Amino acid sequence: MDKKDPFSPITIGGIEAGNRIMRSAVNDHLGNPDGTVSDAQIDMYDVLARNEIGTIITGHISVLPELDCRADPVQLSAGDDGKIDGLRRIADKVHEYGGVAVAQISHAGSRGMKRVDFNELSSDSLKSIGGLFVDAAARVQAAGFDAVEVHAAHWYMLASMLNADINRRTDEYGGDASGRLRLTRHIVEGIRSRCGSEFGIFVKLNAHNTLAGIDDEYMLVDYARELQAAGVDLVDVSGMSFAKQARSAECYFIDAARRVKEACPELVVALVGGIFSRSTIERALDAVDMASLGRTLLTQPDFIARMRAGEAEQSRCIRCNKCFEVFKTKFERCIFGPVNPKLKETFGGEDSK
């Protein structure tokens, strides 16, 4: 692909983003126990949005009305209309600085506080879950978001259904690749029908969709093709192995993402994982359309603004992955940041000092 300027604009379906930098969905653990948006989250989005990140994706938001099925006790919810006003605060904050606001929605499945194994659900139950995704997308649209990202990665329910080794179903939601994708595809089609042609639909996918993760890249390409045909505007390529990568590793899933872009040239493709510097951003953009950053912006939310100003070429993130151990490290989100009192209040335990 031609070399792309990270700060050049990009069209994603009916959306115009000011640059090719995306803040990847990161679960901030700052929501209120009732699933509503907290003031601390608005403060966080203010810092992100003011620092030249063109597209900002929220941490994953539960589609379920039941709070006990969420991924954690303070995960946000879009499971009922009462959550719309709070979610609007996030969208408004991102728009205040000219950014594109994207809400990621998910079903925790077997990773929830109350585990739900999709293999044990009836086909009618899965259809109902699909309807919950569509309803949640309509709510975030009503809240002012420009797009929704359907979370089909990281072993949550939809990702597990896409995995050839985990999906044991023998009905229409299992078997071959098309069956494993059926629920996600129907969700996308439902969102497109309900929310219209101008509303953005992103889907986050794992680079590998077998437990071994060997010679299975063709599955990702097949999934991307089907989802593009269903109405998806952007595929966000991630994976489950990001927390196990060596500190020196870069652009973890770039080969898989490149294959998707080559197979679907009209589809906007983003890459997340192992992007910590100007050079890795540029490397990602040699292969795909957008560079998505998570840990970099967690530890240094002004990195993109500093990079553009010529003040930084490399993030201070050292890839220690302590941010993935929020329940184990006495509530530190990053070794460079202070203890977050909101986390201590939510999960209990002693102060880390």
Image (spheres, rainbow, N blue to C red):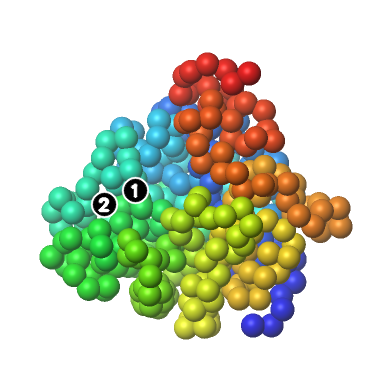
Occupied quadrant, residue 172? bottom left
Cα separation between marks 1 and 2:
8 Å
* Residue positioned 53% across, 30% down in the render: 329
The residue labelled by disc 2 is: 129
Do the numbered discs 1 and 2 sit on residues whose CB atoms are within 8 Å?
yes
Secondary structure beneath label 2: helix
Q: Which three-letter amino acid code belongs to the residue tagged 2?
A: Ile
Quadrant for the N terminus in the image = bottom right
| Mark 1 vs mark 2: in front | 1
* Residue positioned 63% across, 69% down in the render: 284
Label whose residue precedes the other's in the sequence (1 or 2): 1
The residue labelled by disc 1 is: 107
Secondary structure beneath label 1: loop
Judge by depth and name the residue closer to the eye, 27 or 91.
27
Seen in the image, is 52 located left or right of residue 45? right
Count neighbours of disc 1 (C-alpha within 10 A) and say few if under 14, some if 14 to 19, many if 20 or more. Answer: many
